Amino acid sequence: RVLKEISVSKHPDRCCHVLSKLHWLHKKSVTALPEIIQWDLGPGETDVISFAVKHHNVCPVVDDLQAKKCINALGLKSLGTGSLLILAKKNGLIDSVEQSLRRLQHAGLWISEPVIEMLKKRAGEN
């Protein structure tokens, strides 16, 4: 269900094309856990968190506040998209956190300007 959510963007063909080229990315079937379902999250968040509960070596990436609360209640760690971009920059995978955030905005992800400014600062992009 996560792939379905990701594919619903302003550019679904481009999204699926890029994802199909990521050979390290593997599609997995997930059975949603009842304790996660009761949080009434979206299907993607429910699947990601259910997968993380079953596979403790996985760090879920979520931005939804309610999903983060669920993860914290379960005693799990998570990352948000912004933190992931900062890590990518620190590891030389991207040149600019701001530029990557703007691309995500253009693709349809809602990100507030204060959040962009905070992430830029954390990444050393003043």
Image (spheres, helix red, strand yellow):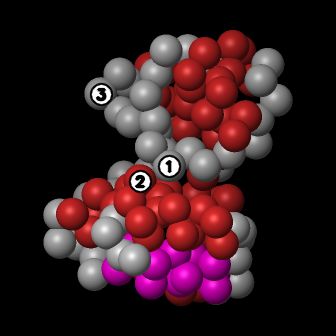
Q: Amino acid at mark 1?
A: Gly
The overriding secondary structure of the stretch rendered in magenta is helix
With 18 as the anchor, is 25 left or right in this view?
Answer: left
Q: Earlier in the sequence, mark 1 or mark 3?
A: 3
* Residue at (35% x, 22% y) in the render: 56
Q: Are marks 1 and 2 in contact (CB under 8 Å)?
A: yes
Q: Residues within 10 Å of mark 2 (few under 14, many from 20)?
A: some
Residue 81 in the image: state x and y as whole percent: 49, 57
* Residue at (28% x, 76% y) in the render: 94
Q: Residues within 10 Å of mark 1 (few under 14, many from 20)?
A: few
Label 1 – label 2 distance at C-alpha: 5 Å
Which residues make up the magenta segment? 96-107
> Which of labels 2 and 3 is toward the front?
2
Q: Earlier in the sequence, mark 2 or mark 3?
A: 3
> Which of labels 1 and 3 is toward the front?
1
* Residue at (69% x, 13% y) in the render: 35
Q: Which residue is mark 1?
A: 80
